[in-house]
Image: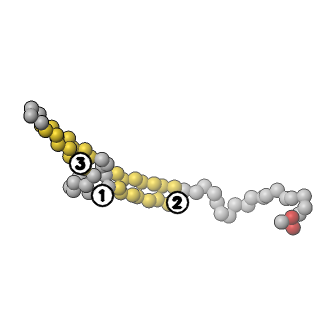
Amino acid sequence: MTGSVQWQNIDLGMNESNRKRITTWGDDFYTTIDYCYETDMILVKLSFNLNWKNSNTKHPQSEFGEKEF
């Protein structure tokens, strides 16, 4: 069994990384928009293998015996 944890975009919202502000103004208006491209993400991965290494499997025999290859 194996596991891993991955943390992407590490700033916890404290830094202004991955953010963009667009400000537009004219004679009768003023607007500003804040974009946050990606938030913090935590990825957890667990995987396991169901194949046992010490299994007693029997493979079919060839017509020519073990010296075929």
Q: Secondary structure at mark 2?
A: loop
Residue topped by disc 2: 1
Compute the Cα span from label 1 to label 3.
17 Å
- Nearest to the observer: residue 6 or residue 32: 32
Q: Reading the chain from its start, which is encountered first: label 1 or label 2?
A: 2
Compute the Cα span from label 1 to label 2.
27 Å
What residue lies at 30% left-to-right and 57% top-to-bottom?
Answer: 10
Q: Residue furthest left?
A: 27
- Nearest to the observer: residue 27 or residue 55: 27
Q: Amino acid at mark 1?
A: Ile
Q: Secondary structure at mark 1?
A: loop
Number of marks: 3
Q: Position of residue 43 (x, y in %)?
A: 40, 53
Residue 66 seen in the figure: no
Q: Position of residue 61 (x, y in %)?
A: 85, 59
Q: Please give the label number shown on residue 2.
A: none
| 3 or 2: mark nearer the eye | 3
Q: Residue furthest right?
A: 64
61 to the left or right of 13: right
Residue 9 seen in the figure: yes
Compute the Cα span from label 3 to label 2.
41 Å
- Nearest to the observer: residue 38 or residue 56: 38
Q: Residue furthest front?
A: 27
Q: Please give the label number shown on residue 10.
A: 1
Q: Position of residue 27 (x, y in %)?
A: 9, 34
What residue lies at 31% left-to-right and 52% top-to-bottom?
Answer: 40
Residue topped by disc 3: 20
Label pair 1/2, CB-CB below 8 angstroms? no
Q: Position of residue 13 (x, y in %)?
A: 23, 52
